Image (cartoon, rainbow, N blue to C red):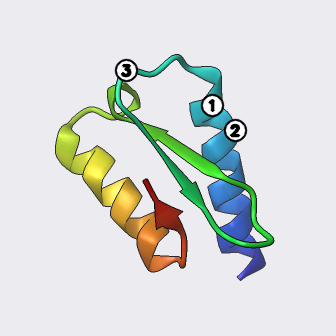
Amino acid sequence: MKKIILSFAVLALMLSVNSCKKCTTCTKASSPDLKFCENDYSSKDDYDDAVALATLGGYDCN
């Protein structure tokens, strides 16, 4: 579980550095917020998959 949280934290840090056009922020109690930006992925499907994975991990994405 710690590896998953650490992976999400690293991903969120990398994504927060880049400017975004369409972004989604995912939150979860006692966990760092995750920010996914569509222009950080090679396709919309990859972006959608990343948001879906966060949702499966218990995050609430808006």
Relative placement, left or right, of 20 versus 48 is right
Could you classify mark 3 by the number of other residues whose Cα lies within 10 Å: few (under 14), some (14-19), or many (20 or more)? few
Given this view, does label 3 or label 2 mark the residue nearer the observer? 3
The image shows residue 51, relative to residue 60, as above or below, that is above
The image quarter in which residue 55 lies: bottom left
For label 1, the SS is helix
22 or 44, which is in the foreground?
22
Between 54 and 60, the one nearer to me in the picture: 60
Instruction: Indicate the amino acid at tag 1.
Output: Ser
**Mark linked to residue 21:** 3
Q: Position of residue 54 (x, y in %)?
A: 48, 65
Which mark is on residue 13?
A: 2
Callout 1 touching callout 2 (CB < 8 Å): yes
Place of residue 20 in the rendered image (x, y in percent of width and height, measured from the top left): 45, 22
Name the mark on residue 16: 1
- Residue neighbourhood size for the residue with mark 2, other residues' Cα within 10 Å, grouped as few (<14), some (14–19), many (≥20): some
Amino acid type at circle 3 is Lys
Q: Position of residue 52 (x, y in %)?
A: 35, 65
The residue lying at 71 percent from left, 53 percent from top is 9
Query: At 45% from the left edge and 59% from the top edge, which residue is drawn?
Result: 61
Marks 1/2: CA–CA distance: 5 Å
